Image (spheres, rainbow, N blue to C red):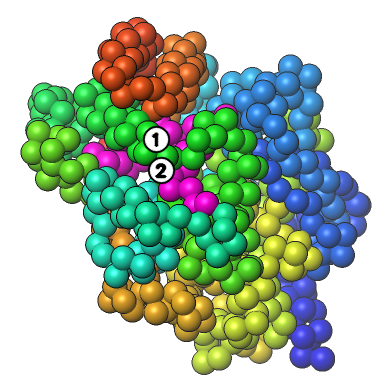
């Protein structure tokens, strides 16, 4: 009975807050088509959150998830003007925007019409709002992540890192692994002592995902080994230490260069060449599809890889579902050994300060017949009540409140790691790519007769009582062996976000031809070098540097100017 009353109370509050545009058309059913530029599964027909959305907003959804190459898929949709109402182009967002697929949300979002949405984006509007060719302000996508309240929460590494299975670290006596050589030495020694898993399947020492836009797993490690957070395909010198390593002129602010053709990049790929010859790197790694890569991770045989946490989440989920906790991963912030960088000690800075996920999330396509209705829905979904519903679920069923704190039983928390349960009980397809609250709950919230006190976390996985109290026993013991409280302790605390944000968010369209050539050369030549006879590596590297030179120079020059323009937008001249 309490559960039913809680649901009714939540719905009553939500209905009372629905803006006028929703109230006028709330009873007229509409089906919104949704494209999501990542693989995924559609929710079950009886999904309880989508049923609540349908009841109160009159909206149902038809989902299309990515199947195939993202750029090709977006290109075909642009050519055919085949646009879903809600359009998430993922890492090809700039392609969709330049192709004319998205409407300008500023026609519908303002302090007067949508105060919640405006308050959500206003602190970062300098980064989020661009100019079109005519000099008009434009906003095509409200970020799906990165606009958080309160201090930054870093309980784990959500972005790039070198990953290693926990069992490898445990086997070695829980060592501190800080450099590239230490990392590969560790994996090599583990495989020498444990060549196969319990089923007799050979372990893969290191996997490199190269398919489509996910080739960042092959390309991006160099900048991180130099100690920097993720700037995409350029390395930006911002400290005296970095200038010393690269030999750049410290009088140039935010000196930007392509890194893939520099001597410090050669060190990484030569190391991969050595490991490939030893058999430590998966022999089919350069031809594996994303699905094949995830299947290998899900089986527990991949000991290490460079990736971003969100990219292989389904593999981690499969291991967690199977209670193969020892095969899940710790994220390490590796740097170059001094021998690779003129004897300099590199300081690790993998995690950036608070960063809006610029141009990532849902936009509304030009084909949509009811943009006002979608914006009004987003506005209402940013209410405290809806955010609790999306994040935590239904009080008494999916979580409980005790002394003003949001809590879960062990079973309730386990549900969040159950993919089948989520298809029936979460609205991830819509919520993941929609505007959302993150970080800390800043003010008290009343749900029915219960008060959720300020200081709770919007996301259950960040709530301390849950993160630590309901952590599985293996992970508790693993962290205790290191004297850590959370997996984020394996890397240094976040550094202050540079004024340009992260350079991968800059629009490459003005230099698209050169950038495409730049990537094509990397995608072709780097695997060839890694697999080559070691005696041929130096010659192949020199040929690679010469071949990529023209496109690298054009891209580098463009990015140098673009980075400085971003700085001007945020801090002025």
Instruction: Answer yes or no: is residue 54 visible.
Output: yes
Front one among 166 and 46: 166
- State the residue position of label 2: 280
* Disc 1 element: helix
Q: Residue at the spot x=55%, y=81% of the render?
A: 406
Q: Are marks 2 and 1 in contact (CB under 8 Å)?
A: yes
Q: Secondary structure at mark 2?
A: loop
Question: Relative to the observer, which residue lies in front, 3 or 69?
Answer: 69
Q: Is residue 241 visible?
A: no
Badge 2: few (under 14), some or many (20 or more) residues near its Cα, within 10 Å? many
- The answer to which quarter of the image holds residue 494 is bottom left
Q: Position of residue 87 (x, y in %)?
A: 69, 37
Q: Is residue 451 above or below residue 327?
A: below
Stretch of the chain drawn in magenta: 202-230
Residue 312 vertical position relative to residue 542 in the rendered view, above or below: below
**The C terminus lies in quadrant:** top left
Quadrant location of the N terminus in the rendered image: bottom right
| Residue extending furthest toward the right | 28
Q: Is residue 213 magenta?
A: yes
Asked if 463 appears above or below 21 in the picture, the reply is below
Q: Which residue is mark 1?
A: 276
Question: In the rendering, at what x and y percent does residue 333 appear?
Answer: 30, 52
């Amino acid at each position: 009975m309490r559960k039913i009353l809680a649901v009714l109370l939540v719905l009553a509050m939500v209905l009372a807050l629905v803006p006028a545009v929703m109230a006028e058309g709330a009873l007229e059913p509409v089906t919104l088509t949704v494209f999501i530029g990542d693989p995924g599964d559609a929710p079950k027909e009886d999904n309880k959150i989508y049923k609540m959305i349908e009841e109160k907003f009159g909206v149902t959804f038809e989902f299309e998830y990515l199947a195939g190459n993202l750029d090709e898929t977006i290109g075909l949709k642009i050519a055919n003007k085949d646009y879903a109402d809600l359009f998430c182009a993922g890492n090809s967002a700039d392609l969709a925007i330049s192709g004319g697929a998205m409407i300008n949300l500023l026609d519908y979002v303002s302090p007067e019409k949508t105060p919640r949405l405006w308050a959500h984006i206003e602190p970062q509007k300098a980064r989020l709002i661009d100019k079109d060719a005519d000099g008009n302000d434009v906003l095509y996508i409200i970020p799906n992540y990165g606009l958080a309240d309160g201090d930054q929460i870093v309980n784990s590494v959500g972005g790039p890192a070198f990953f290693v299975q926990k069992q490898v670290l445990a086997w070695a006596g829980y060592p501190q692994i800080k450099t590239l050589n230490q990392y590969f030495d560790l994996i090599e020694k583990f495989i020498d002592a444990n060549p196969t898993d319990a089923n007799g399947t050979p372990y893969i020492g290191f996997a490199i995902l190269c398919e489509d836009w996910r080739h960042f797993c092959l390309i991006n490690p160099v900048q991180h080994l130099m100690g920097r957070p993720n700037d995409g395909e350029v390395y930006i010198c911002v400290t005296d230490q970095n200038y010393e390593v690269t030999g750049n002129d410290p009088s140039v602010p935010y000196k930007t260069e392509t890194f893939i053709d520099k001597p410090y990049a050669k060190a990484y790929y030569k190391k991969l060449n050595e490991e490939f010859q030893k058999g430590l790197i998966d022999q089919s790694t350069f031809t594996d599809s994303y699905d094949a890569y995830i299947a290998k991770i899900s089986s527990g045989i991949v000991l290490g890889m460079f990736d971003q946490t969100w990219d292989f989440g389904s593999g981690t989920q499969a291991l967690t579902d199977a209670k193969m906790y020892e095969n899940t991963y710790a994220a390490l912030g590796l740097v170059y050994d001094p021998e690779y960088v003129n004897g300099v000690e590199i300081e690790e800075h993998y995690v950036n300060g608070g960063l809006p996920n610029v141009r990532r999330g849902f936009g509304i396509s030009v084909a949509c017949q009811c943009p006002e209705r979608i914006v009004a829905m987003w506005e209402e979904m940013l209410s405290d009540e809806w955010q609790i519903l999306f994040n935590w679920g239904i009080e008494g069923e999916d979580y409980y409140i005790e002394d003003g704190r949001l809590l879960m039983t062990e079973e309730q928390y386990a549900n969040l790691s159950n993919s089948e349960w989520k298809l029936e009980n979460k609205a991830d397809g819509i919520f993941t790519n929609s505007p959302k609250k993150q970080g800390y709950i800043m003010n008290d919230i009343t749900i029915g007769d219960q008060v959720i006190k300020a200081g709770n976390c919007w996301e259950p996985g960040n709530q301390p009582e849950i993160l630590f109290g309901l952590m599985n026993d293996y992970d508790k013991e693993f962290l205790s062996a290191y004297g850590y409280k959370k997996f984020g302790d394996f890397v240094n605390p976040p550094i202050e976000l540079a004024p340009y944000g992260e350079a991968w968010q800059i629009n490459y369209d003005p230099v698209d031809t050169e950038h495409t050539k730049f990537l094509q050369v990397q995608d072709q030549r780097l695997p060839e070098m890694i697999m080559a006879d070691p005696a041929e590596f130096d010659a192949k590297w020199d040929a690679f540097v010469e071949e990529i030179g023209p496109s690298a120079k054009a891209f580098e020059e463009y990015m140098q100017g673009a980075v400085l323009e971003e700085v001007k937008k945020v801090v002025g001249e």
